Amino acid sequence: MNAQSQPTFHIEKIYLKDLSLEIPNAPDIFLERDTPQIDLQLNTKNQEINDGLFEVQLMVTVTAKINDKVMFLVETQQAGIFKIGNVPDKEMAPVLGIGCPNILFPYLRETVSDVVTRAGFPPVILNPVNFEAIYNKNQKYDSSESANTKQ
């Protein structure tokens, strides 16, 4: 294999694409002493923006509630532009669905913790995410959906 056909992977840019914080029950919610329930929703998406340039987005919604009252709601999109070359088509999906989200996650995690702290609440530290397991689970789900559709 010559140097021109070797797979390449470069991080071109990592950036915060969107950030939203809501504290709908302020200031009363700051007087609550109960421990909130934290709900987390995590999604990824990617798109080719140019030949060999891909944008990958990692999106999270964190909602903290005490009983039925929303303490805070954070929505953020951490994104990156990646230059990927000479990667076989069958290997591109795992690179975009596992590798890139693994690179973006620490930035997303820091953003969520920072914004929640700046809002006056104790930090929310997101647990590590196994993007490979999520990717594999989604692949099995997609395969079963395809199989069910064909029947």
Image (cartoon, helix red, strand yellow):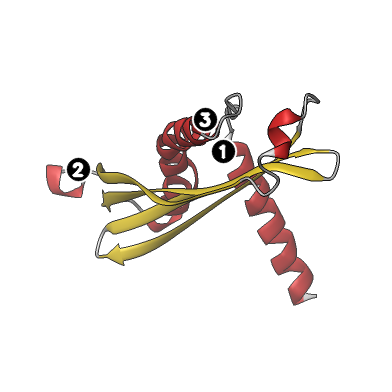
> Furthest-bottom residue in view?
150
Between discs 3 and 2, the one toward the N terminus:
2
Distance between the Cα atoms at labels 3 and 2? 45 Å
Mark 2 vs mark 1: in front = 1
Q: Residue at x 66, y 39 (%)?
A: 27
Q: Residue at x 33, y 46 (%)?
A: 15
Mark 1: give few (<14), some (14-19) or many (20+) Cα within 10 Å.
some
Q: Residue at x 46, y 53 (%)?
A: 93
Q: Is residue 122 above or below residue 29?
A: above
Describe the element under mark 1 as helix, strand or loop: helix
Identified by mark 1, the residue type is Glu
Residue 94, x across and y down, in percent: 48, 47
Q: Is residue 108 above or below residue 57?
A: above
> Furthest-left residue in view?
3
Q: What residue is shown with label 3?
A: 113
Q: Residue at x 54, y 35 (%)?
A: 119
Q: Where does the N terminus fall, quadrant-wise?
A: top left
Between 150 and 56, the one lying in front of the other is: 56
Q: Is residue 124 left or right of residue 13?
A: right
Residue 28, x across and y down, in percent: 73, 38
- Answer with the quarter of the image where residue 134 lies: top right
